[in-house]
Amino acid sequence: MYTLIQKVIDLNESKIWYLTVISLIIILVMILRLEGRRKRILANKIPGPDGSIFIGLLPLFLQGPEKLISSGLKVYQKYEKSLFKVWVLNNLYIVLTRPEDIELVLTNPKLQKKSKEYLVLQESIMGQGIFSIDDIKKWKSNRKMVSGGFNFKIIKSFIPIFFEESNVLNNILKQNYDLKSNECDISSPISMATMEMIGKTALGVKFNAQNGGRHRFVENLQTAMIAWEYRITHPWYLSKTLFRLSSVNQKHDQSQKIINDFTDEIINKKLDELNQNANNEKKVETDDEDICRKTKTVIEILLGNYHEMSHEQIRDELVTIMIGGQETTAMANACAIFMLAHHPEVQNKVFEELQSIFSIGDQNRSPTYEDLQQMEYLERVIKETLRIFPPLPVFGRSLEEEMQIGEYLCPAGSTLMVSPLFLQSSTQYYTDPEKFNPDNFLPDTCRSRHPYTFIPFSAGYRNCIGIKYGMLQMKTVISTLVRKNTFFPSDRCPTPKHLRLMFLATLKFVDGCYVKIVPRTS
Ligand code: HEM
């Protein structure tokens, strides 16, 4: 015994340090193994496809983003009676299928943290913006400040901008359609229109995107988003270290820098402008509220919190809003026009509703907020479009502690997944879910369903901040286009089943969205 003690005393400091490190590593490996074991034991009790050994359902992803939707739907339909598990490499996903479980998760204050896939956005231009941030304390206070830019009065003042850009869109579509067949791919023009709208309303910037202005922000935003899609559809690139080795990484980093530099420039310019106009501003604020509101954009509201938010934070929030508000509404607007083209009886009802709101000869009048409120049928059309084509088809939350959901104990370290796309096309909640039926959103029908059976904007704590903005913008775009045109199916895409979609973080068209456009004569 004495010799053992003597030996320990004789160890020099570096050896003791070495032994400590080795012991810590051994303990850590044991803990991880135990945790992994527990995760596997609990996972084994949850139904779901086993997939291949070690790689799970990775082959599903490797089939490509278009096939992923149909293959994913098959798996979902097979297991949707309860929540189910899916392994992809060593990641465990628990897919929630019942509205009760989804509500439990989305309204649980302990489950506000997004899953690790969102790191892709955090490591990119969204940074610490409220969409991707996982520091919940910071998210709470930032969300409060960002919400200021989306209050009712501010959003209402954006309607003339939505209308102006919808008219530009209408002219662009006229220039774009084939003179013989009247066919046109509406996806890209609509995408540029929503880009211009969000640029003007959030940043107070004109990109001239609709008229082909190749703005550096717009172009680099698209490059950065392609890089995310690449990472998400190649799950091993979720690791930043591996992604750094890929050829896409360099392009992404260049784009990130250009976007950040541009947004910094805008913030600095706006700050100077605000400082210079401080006295005039004060005067305007005491004048007619309407005049003041017209001049406010989301950036100005955020800069009002410049002392509470860092410059970088404001930049991240602005870029987040630009991304959150552009692609989502572009996809929804295009899908709604496409579905109207394929459902003439629905299109006629929308037009009749518009005729009851706008008098004859009123074609160029901008809708007021009250007009948009009266477009109840159009609202149902938009909701039905979002049911069938939710622009964000999947979202996830990180499960950090074991939790009982329904009859299953879900292991810590897994990701809880919710899929509006699959949930909203389930026969369990919608009769004939493939049918485009705006009456699914009649008040009584809505009341008869669990509210969490329709969640295109998510719900609960981290629901979409842009719901009102989105609804007013979509109503303005669609009503303006339908007031001026009739839409018909294109020969290139004769039925809705021919519309090819893919899952690339958001829902996207594989080869455009074609319709025939015939301008109304009076
Ligand atoms: C059709 C239109 C839209 C759809 C379907 C949609 C959908 C969603 C969904 C599903 C989420 C939650 C995502 C998650 O949990 O990971 C979300 C969050 C968010 N959306 Fe939207 N969105 C739309 C329009 C907009 C608009 C117009 C804006 C801003 C102008 C916006 C900004 C945001 C932001 C900032 C968040 C993060 C909120 C937070 O975590 O606190 N969205 N959106």
Image (tube, rainbow, N blue to C red):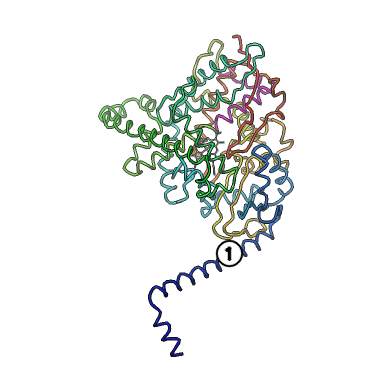
Pointer 1 residue: 35
Q: Is residue 48 visible?
A: no
Find residue 482 and report its horizontal and vertical position in percent. Answer: 60, 19
- Is 201 left, or right, of 475 in this rendering? left
Q: Residue at x 36, y 35 (%)?
A: 264
Nearest the eye: 369 or 85: 85
- Is 121 left, or right, of 101 in this rendering? left
Find residue 15 and report its horizontal and vertical position in percent. Answer: 42, 74
Looking at the magenta stretch, what is its main secondary structure?
Answer: helix
Relative height, residue 445 to residue 138 (above, below): above
Nearest the eye: 161 or 116: 116
340 in magenta? yes
Find residue 80 and report its horizontal and vertical position in percent. Answer: 71, 48
Instruction: Identify which amino acid the numbered label 1 is placed on.
Output: Glu
Relative height, residue 351 to residue 252 (above, below): above
Q: Secondary structure at mark 1?
A: helix
Q: Is residue 258 visible?
A: yes
- Is 164 left, or right, of 271 in this rendering? right
432 in magenta? no
Find residue 432 and report its horizontal and vertical position in percent. Answer: 74, 35
- Magenta segment boundaries in residue numbering: 328-357
Nearest the eye: 272 or 453: 272
Q: Residue at x 48, y 69 (%)?
A: 24
